[in-house]
Image: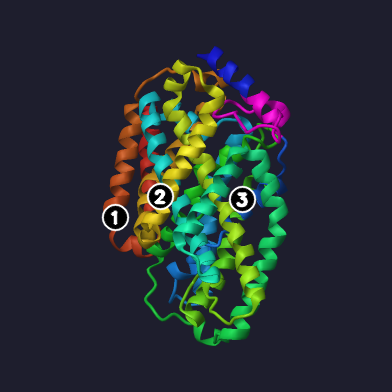
Amino acid sequence: MMDMAREDEESGIEGLGRIGKEIETIGISPVPLKLRRLTQMDLFVFWAMASASAATPLAGYLLYGVGIPYFIIIIALSTLIGIIPAGLFSEIGRQKPIVALVQARRTFGYYPANALSILYTFVNMGWFGLNLAVGAEILTAVSGLSFVFWAIIMGILQIVLVLFGAKWLNYFMKYTAPILLISYAVLTYFLFSYYHPEISKLMTPSVNINWGLLINLILSFSILSWTYKITTVTRFAKPSDKISISYFVSSGLGIMLPVLLMGILGYISQSAAGNWNLAAIYKPGDPIWVIIAAIGASLAIIHTNSMNLYPAVADLLVSIEPFIRKVKKYKLSQPLATIGLGIISLILAILGILNYVENFLLLVGDVIFPFTFILLVDWYTGLKQMEMEAFYTPSKWVSVKALVALIIGVLLNYYNIFGIVSLYFPYQVLGSLIAAAIYYILKKV
C-alpha cells in the first residue's frame, strides 16, 4: 500500500511541479516538502477570498430582523466558537500534509471513512450549486439572458480553474481580490446613494432572537462547515509540529471577516431593496458602472466555489481509491473527478437548490459538526504521533467506537433534545461536543 502512496506521490510531484503546463494530479497523496510554502498571510487571503462570495451577504438574510448590533454580536460569538476547531485543523495540515478524510480512515475505519467521503462529496456539491445559483442570478439580472445560460458558463469556468489545482487557485484569489473589493465598494455606494437605507431603523431587533439557532446557522454557513476542509489547503503551508498562533487563527479569521462585513451589507440591502443579494438589485436604466461592478462581484462566486469543488474532489478520491489503485489511473483520477462533480453541481444549481438553503445548512451542521470534533479528539490524543504511511495503509476496517459516537452526535443534533439551553447556545455544537466526549471515553475504556 505504501508503494502505491509513494507512486501516487511521485505522480503528484510531477503534476504539481509542472503546473501551468498541465493540471494538478497530486490527488490525496502527501504533499511534497518542496511544495509546502504557504504563509499565514497566504492562508488568510486564500480563505478570505474563498469565503467572500456573492452568496456571503446571505448571512444578513439568515439573521434578518435581529438588528445590526445583535448581528455583529452573533457573528463575533460564532467566530469565538469556531476559531478553536478551525485553528486545530489548520495545525493538523502543517503537522501531516494529508486531507481530513484520509485521517478519518484511522478514526472511523477504512470503509466508514470511504462512505463519509461520498457523503461529504455531495455536501460540497450542494455548496457549489448554491453559490453557482447566486452568481447566475447576478449575471441574469444585469444581462437579461437566461439563468441556465449563465449557470453553464460560470460552471465551466470554475471547473477549468479547479483543474489546475491549489497553486493556481491561490494565484487567482490573490490577483482578483482587488477586483472583488472595488466591485463591492461600488455596489455599496450604489445601495446607499440610490436606495437611501434608514440605518437607524436597523439598529433595534424586529424579531425575537433565538441565539442558539442563529449561531448554529452562521456556524453551518461559514466557519464550521469549512473546518474539516482547512487541511486541504494548510497541507501546502510551511510544516511545523509546534502550534503557531498566527497560523492557528489565520484561516478562521479569513473565513469570518467577509461574513461579518458582507453580511451587514446583505442585511441593509434586504431592508432597502428587498433583496439580500446587492449585486442583483440592478434595474434597467441604472448606471452602466453598476453592471460592471456586479460582473466583478460574480468573480467572488468563483473564489468560493473553487474551495467547494476542490475539497469535494479530494473527498471523492478518498472513497474510490481502491478502484483507482486497481486500474492504476492516478494521474487521471483528479481531473476526471473534477469534471464529473462539477457537472453534477451545475445540475443542482439549475434545479433550484438555493430555495432550500436553511434546511441544507442545518443538515450540514447535524453531520459535519460531530464528525469534525471526533476527528480533532482522535488526532490530538494519538494520531498525531503516527508515521505518514499509517494513514495510507488499511488497518482497522470499521471503528465501532467512532461510529457510535458519530451516530449519537447526529441524533442529538437532529432531534435537539436540549430544550431551553438551545435558545442560548448552539445545540449542534453542544451535541457534537458530547459526541466527542463519548468517543474519548470509549477510547480510554
Observer-side mark, 3 or 1, equals 3
- Considering only vertical position in the picture, is 426 above or below 97? below
Residue 347's disc is 2
Label 2 near label 3: C-beta < 8 Å?
no
30 and 200: which is toward the camera: 30
Quadrant of res 419: bottom left
The residue type indicated by label 2 comes to Ile
Quadrant of res 80: bottom right
207 and 424: which is toward the camera: 207
Instruction: Mark 2: give few (<14), some (14-19) or many (20+) Cα within 10 Å.
Output: some
Predominant SS of the magenta segment: loop
Magenta stretch bounds:
12-36
Expressed as whole percent of the image width and height from the top left, the position of residue 13 reads 66, 25
- Considering only vertical position in the picture, is 31 above or below 55? above
- Considering only vertical position in the picture, is 348 above or below 58? above
Going from the N terminus, do you reach mark 3 or mark 2 first?
Answer: 3
Q: Residue at x 36, y 55 (%)?
A: 351
Residue 47's disc is 3
In the picture of the structure, the residue carrying the numbered disc 1 is 416
> Is residue 367 visible to the viewer in this orientation of the structure?
yes
